Amino acid sequence: MKITELPEVFTQALPVLNEINKNGFEAYFVGGCVRDLILGRHIHDVDIATSAYPEEIKNIFKKTIDTGIQHGTVTVLNNGESYEITTFRTESGYQDYRRPDHVTFVQNLSEDLKRRDFTINALAMDVEGNVIDHFDGLNDLNQQIIKAVGKAENRFHEDALRMMRAVRFMSQLEFKLDPLTRQAIDDNHELLAKISVERIRDEFVKMGIGPGSREAFQVFLDSGLSEEVPGFAGKKEALAIFPKLNFAPSTEANLWALMIILLKIPNDQIAHFMRMWKNSNALERQVANTVEFFDLISAQDPNNYDLFKVDLATIASAIDLAHILGQPINGQALIDRYEALPIKENHDLVINGSFLLKNGIPAGPQVGEILDKIIEKIVEGELVNDQKAISQYLANHLNNE
Ligand SMILES: Nc1ccn([C@@H]2O[C@H](COP(=O)(O)OP(=O)(O)OP(=O)(O)O)[C@@H](O)[C@H]2O)c(=O)n1
Ligand SMILES: [Mg+2]
C-alpha cells in the first residue's frame, strides 16, 4: 500500500525523516499515526522510529531534548514542532509485566515492529508513503479487528497494560477483539494488578467514553479485567448495567459519576473512590457535585435555590446522567429555570457582608446566614437584588427580632 496524499502533520515532519535518511539511517512513521492515517481519523502527533542511536540523532539535529533517553527516545524540535524519535528497539528487558526501565536496541524495523502490541499498531510508513506491514495489520484494519502481534500472551507479559489498551481500542475504534487475543486476556487479567493506577485510568477513561464503550465494557467485565482495578472487585453485577444502557457517557466526569452511581458509592466516599483512581481534586469536586445534583433531581423537583447552588455545567452533566440512566427528567426546563435566575453567583449580589454590618446586623456567624437567606429570597423571587429593597428587608428583619 502506498499513500500518495499525506496530511500536513506528516508532510511537516518529512524534513526530519529526510535529514535522518541523508545521514545514512532509516526513519519511519510508526504506530498510532499510521493506523489513524489509514482509518482517516484525526492524528494528534506522529511518532518516528529510526535505526540511528539517540546520540546519533542528537548529533544530526541542533535542538533536541532527552525526553526518554532510557527508552531510546529523543525529542527533536524542528520548525516549531516537536517529534519523538525512538531508536528501533525490543522490550525484552521487561521485568514484572510493566514497561521496561531499559531497552535493547535492534538492527531493523522488523524487529521493532515485532514487539508492538497489536497488528494495527505495528504498521510503519516511509517518506514516500509506502506502508510497511509485516503482521497483516492492514487486513485487520480492514476487518476491524484488534489482534496481538504474534502470541498474545507474550505481548501481555511484556506489558500488562496492553490488555486495557485492547478494550480501549475496541471502544475508540468500534473494533472487534480477535478470539485468541481475547482468550489471552481472560487467562492473564490478573497481571493488570501490577500496573500503575494512572496508566490503567487513562485507558479506562478512553474505553469508557469511546463510541464502542458498551461492547468494550462487556469484555472488560467478562474477561476479569474489572476485578483488577480500584473499587471494582466483586462488583461485576452492579457494573453489568453499563453495557445495557441506551446511551453511554461522553465525558470523563460523567463516566466517573456513572461508575459511582452504579457502584452505589455513598456521597461521603466519593472523594476516596476518586483518589483511589488518582483523579485530580478538581475532577473529584466536579464529579461529586454532579452526583449530588443528580440524586437531588432524581428525588424531587429542585427549587431555585438548589439551582443557584450549582453551576450550568453541573446541571448539564446531571441531566446527561439522567438521560443515560433513563430517568424521566425535563432537562430543558431545568436549564431554562437556571438561565432565568435573577442572580447566578454570590458576586452577582449587589450587597456583601459589610453592607449588613452597616445596616445594623451585628458581626458574627449570623452575617453569613442572613446573606444566604437574602440570596434564597432573591432567587425565589421574593426579594429584589437591589440595595434599597435589601435595606428594607433587613430593617424588617431586625424589627421582628
Ligand atoms: N503498551 C504499549 C504502548 C504502545 N505500544 C506501541 O507504541 C505505539 C504508540 O503508543 P501510544 O501513543 O501509547 O498509542 P497509540 O497507538 O499511538 O494510540 P493513541 O492514538 O492513543 O496515541 C503504539 O501504536 C504501539 O505500536 C505498544 O506496543 N505497547
Ligand atoms: Mg500515539
Image (tube, grey):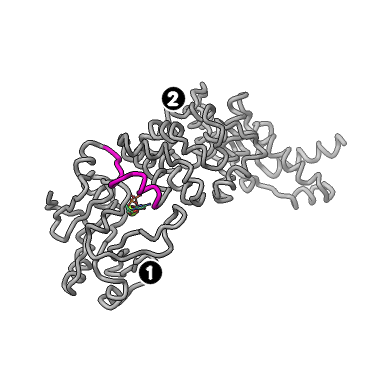
User: Would residue 289 be seen by someone viewing this image from the given angle?
Assistant: yes
For badge 1, the amino acid type reads Ile
Question: For mark 2, what is the residue?
Answer: 244
Task: Where is residue 128? Give x, y as percent.
Answer: 13, 59
| Quadrant housing residue 115 | bottom left
| Quadrant housing residue 183 | top left
Residue 135 versus residue 272: which sits nearer the camera?
135
For badge 2, the amino acid type reads Lys
Residue at 58% over, 46% down: 276
Numbered disc total: 2
- Lateral position of residue 310 relative to residue 85, left or right: right
Mark 1 vs ligand 1: CB under 8 Å? Answer: no
Q: CA distance from mark 1 to mark 2?
A: 45 Å
Taking the magenta stretch, the answer to whether it contains residue 151 is yes
Task: Where is residue 226? Give x, y as percent.
Answer: 49, 37
> Considering the numbered disc 2 on the image, is that residue within a helix, a strand or a loop?
helix
Question: For mark 1, what is the residue?
Answer: 69
Taking the magenta stretch, the answer to whether it contains residue 391 is no
Residue at 52% over, 42% down: 229
Disc sitting over residue 94 in the figure: none
Query: Which badge, 1 or 2, is on the more N-terminal residue?
Result: 1
Residue 99 versus residue 33: which sits nearer the camera?
99
Task: Where is residue 12? Give x, y as percent.
Answer: 22, 62
Q: Nearer the viewer, mark 1 or mark 2?
A: 1
Look at the image and give the residue range highlighted in magenta: 145-158
